[in-house]
Image (cartoon, helix red, strand yellow):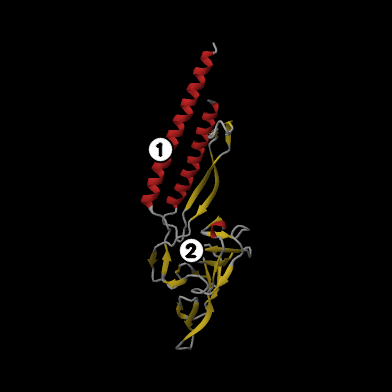
Amino acid sequence: MMRGLYTAASGMMAQQLNMDTISNNLANVNTTGFKKGRINFQDLMYANLNESGENNPMGAQIGMGVRQVGTEKTFSQGSMSQTNDPFDLAIQGNGFFEVIQPDGTKAYTRDGSFSVNAQGQMVTGSGDLVGVTIPPGATDVKIDKDGTVTAILAGQKEHQNIGNLLLVDFVNPQGLKAIGGNKYQNTNASGPAQKGKPGENNLGNIAQGFLEKANINVVEEMISIIEAQRAYEINQKGVQSADQMQKLANQLKK
C-alpha cells in the first residue's frame, strides 16, 4: 500500500512541473521570438513481484511512478507581426541571430527587435551587439533577405553596402541552454554554432520590418492546464486512498 502512496505522489510532483512549464509558456505569450517548452517524462523502475517463466508467461511487475527527464523547446515558426521599423528583423525559417554580450561571450536569439546605440552599433534590447555598425549620417537602411545591409551614406545618392548579417544554426537546437533575455547558449548537446548566409544551407531568410511572435497557442495551453489540474487531482485521490488503506491495515493488527 505504501508503494501506491509514493507512486501517486510522484505523479503529483510531475504535474506540478508540467504546470510550471505551461505557466511559463503563457507568461511569455507576447515575448518576441519566444519558443514554448514541454516537459518530457519517463516511468520509473519496476518492482518484479513474480518473474516471467515457463509456467508464468506474463510475470507480475508494479510500476514505481514517473520522473522528469528533460524540458524540450519547440522551435516551430511563430507568426509574423509587421512593425515597419527598419531595425526590426524576423527570421523566416531555421536559424538564430548571433549576439555578443557585454562580457564578450556569444549568445543566440530569435528576437530581432534591434535598435542603434550612440556609437551606431546595432544592438538588442539588452545592449548585446549584433555585429553591424551604421555609419554616421546614413539614411534609408535596408536589410535584404540574404542579410546584406545597405544605406545611403552622407554625400551619396545610391545605396552602399555597409555590412552583412549572418545567421547560425545547430545540429540539435533542443540542446541549447536558455539563459533568459530571449537568449540561448550552445552546449555539448546542441553542438557548435554553424554560421552561414541567410537563405543558404537550410538557413531561413531575414524579413525587415517584421517581428516573430511567440509560437504559443493560448487555447492549447489552456487545455493543457485543465489536463494537468485533473491529473493532479486524480493523483491526489490516489495518495489519500493509499493512506486510508494503510490506516485500515494498521487497525486490523489491533
Task: Return the x and y of residue 46 as percentages of the image width and height.
Answer: 57, 36
Q: How many marks?
A: 2
Task: Return the x and y of residue 173 as percentages of the image width and height.
Answer: 54, 60
Q: As shown in the figure, which amino acid type bears the numbered disc 1?
A: Arg
Q: Disc 1 on helix, strand or loop? A: helix
In the rendering, which numbered label is found on residue 230? 1
Residue at left 51%, top 19%?
247
Q: As shown in the figure, which amino acid type bears the numbered disc 2?
A: Asp
Does residue 135 appear anywhere in the picture?
A: no
Quadrant location of the C terminus? top right
Does residue 86 appear anywhere in the picture?
A: yes
Mark 2 = which residue? 111
- The one nearer the camera, 200 or 136, is 200
Which corner quadrant of the image does residue 61 belong to?
Answer: top right
In the rendering, which numbered label is found on residue 164? none
Task: Return the x and y of residue 139 as percentages of the image width and height.
Answer: 45, 80
- Vertical comparison of 158 with 27: above or below: below
Farthest top residue in view: 254
Residue at left 56%, top 66%?
99
Task: Return the x and y of residue 180 as percentages of the image width and height.
Answer: 54, 55
Looking at the image, residue 98 sits to the left or right of residue 227; the answer is right
Determine contact: label 2, label 1, CB under 8 Å: no
Residue at left 55%, top 63%?
108
Q: CA distance from mark 2 to mark 1?
A: 35 Å
- Vertical comparison of 40 with 152: above or below: above
Farthest front residue in view: 54
**Nearer-N-terminus badge (2/1):** 2
Tell me the crowding category of disc 2: few under 14, some 14 to 19, or many 20 or more residues within 10 angstroms, Cα based: many
